[in-house]
Image (cartoon, rainbow, N blue to C red):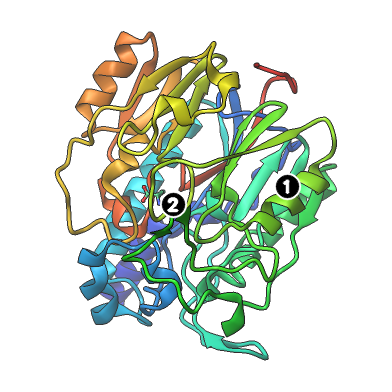
């Protein structure tokens, strides 16, 4: 009996074991784009993940077909089966990265199921599955995003131990101002059914305070592209622009995603002079003219038809892949047309199973933050 119990606990420990990475060294922070040879990376975890309660902020970007999931599970841990399946895939990703000699660190998940209280509201947490949303690495600087969901207010603390290690190794560390996320930070008139009024895109967050998620930015060396979204406002973009220094140019872009939140299924830089776009949201004419000399590659339709298990996102997670270098790209194994297209264009896709992570709201790019890539700070335009 005792033995069975031990076996069970041991197997649980095995499942989550990679989180204990105390013997792994933290290196220099240095990442300027999405494609230089990858050397060190953070991979998220779904351990302790909690489903948010349906709210205007969640509703602003979440497919309406998924509302039932939040109504059924909101405020409770994600179902065990979902956690188990996604954990296996995350551990598989870690193995692939380590086999490529890339150093991997994992966050220490918080107890996201604990209710916390600020002077303005109460909430539970979400997860530490998506470091891409929370941490923006620009050159030698780690920026902690301010975030816009109450469930994500304290999420950065899952990464604080490792940020401190990076700081000790010489990184610059820039925590953005946190907004209050009080009721008057959100736009009371926002209705996801009318995301555009008189040709002007509407958002659930206001301009009252600084707000941004890291995943609304994408990096091409000295040029950084960002979209306003339901989590990123003009003040947040301006805050980043002023703080990263005059050697960088931050370009604001707007495309056809009517409920934008995170740019990494909209435009994805692949290599110098090569950009993948989501053809259902991006017209070539909407790209800044600086891309005129770039090869623009349209992503193929996602393989999996509209799937009700995509609770937080569109099915364009197809494009949410991770470049190991200018050629090799880690992609979800079911996305056969994408894999074929990448091969045709001279890339070397590395397919891995990752579909069970999708219901948490992202794919391989979301689940990671590249901390070090080997390459200089350059202009590609
Ligand atoms: N909100 C975007 C990005 C998700 C990573 C989407 O749903 O495709």
Q: Is residue 49 visible?
A: no
Left/right of residue 360 with respect to residue 97 in the rendered view = left
Question: In front: 283, or 343?
Answer: 283
SS class, disc 2: loop
- Which image quadrant: the N terminus? bottom left
Q: Is residue 209 visible?
A: yes
Residue at 36% x, 66% y: name it.
192
Residue on which the image places disc 2: 199
Rendered location of residue 135, percent (x, y): 63, 51
**Callout 2: few (<14), some (14-19), or many (20+) C-alpha neighbours within 10 Å?**
few
SS class, disc 1: strand
Q: Is residue 109 above or below residue 186?
A: above
Left/right of residue 340 with respect to residue 9 in the rendered view = left
Label for residue 142? Answer: 1
Question: In front: 228, or 11?
Answer: 228
Q: Is residue 316 above or below residue 37?
A: below
User: Given the current orientation, which residue lies at the most extreme left position?
Assistant: 305
């Amino acid at each position: 009996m005792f033995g069975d119990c031990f076996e069970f606990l041991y197997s649980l420990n095995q499942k989550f074991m990679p989180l204990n990475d105390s013997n792994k060294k933290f290196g220099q922070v240095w990442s300027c784009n999405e494609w230089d040879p990858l050397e060190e990376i953070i991979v998220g975890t779904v351990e302790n993940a909690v489903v948010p309660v349906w709210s205007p902020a969640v509703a602003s970007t979440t497919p309406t077909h998924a509302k039932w999931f939040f109504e059924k599970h909101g405020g409770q841990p994600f179902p065990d089966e979902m956690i188990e399946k996604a954990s296996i895939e995350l551990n598989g990703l870690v193995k692939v990265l380590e086999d490529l000699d890339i150093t991997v660190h994992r966050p220490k998940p918080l107890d996201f199921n604990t209710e916390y209280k600020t002077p303005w509201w109460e909430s539970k947490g979400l997860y530490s599955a998506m470091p891409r949303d929370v941490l923006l690495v620009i050159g030698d600087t780690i920026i902690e995003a301010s975030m816009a969901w109450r469930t994500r207010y304290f999420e950065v603390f899952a990464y604080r131990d490792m940020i401190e290690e990076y700081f000790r190794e010489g990184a610059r560390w820039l925590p953005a101002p946190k907004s209050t996320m009080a009721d008057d930070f959100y736009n009371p008139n926002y209705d996801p059914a009318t995301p555009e009024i008189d040709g002007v895109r509407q958002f659930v967050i206001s301009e009252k305070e600084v707000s941004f998620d890291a995943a609304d930015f994408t990096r091409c060396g000295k040029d950084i592209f960002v979209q306003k979204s339901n989590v990123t406002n003009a003040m947040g973009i301006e805050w980043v622009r002023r703080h990263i220094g005059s050697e960088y140019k931050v370009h604001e872009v707007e495309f056809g995603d009517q409920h934008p939140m995170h740019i990494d299924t909209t435009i994805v830089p692949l290599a110098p002079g090569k950009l993948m776009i989501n053809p259902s949201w991006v017209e070539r004419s909407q790209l800044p003219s600086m891309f005129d000399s770039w090869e623009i590659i349209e992503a193929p339709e996602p393989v999996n038809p509209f799937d009700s298990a995509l609770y937080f996102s569109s099915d364009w997670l197809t494009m949410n892949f991770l470049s190991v270098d200018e050629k090799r790209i880690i992609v979800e194994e079911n996305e056969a047309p994408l894999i074929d297209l990448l091969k045709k264009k001279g890339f070397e896709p590395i397919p891995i199973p990752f579909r069970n992570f999708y219901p948490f709201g992202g794919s391989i790019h979301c689940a990671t933050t590249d901390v070090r890539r080997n390459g200089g700070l350059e202009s590609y335009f």
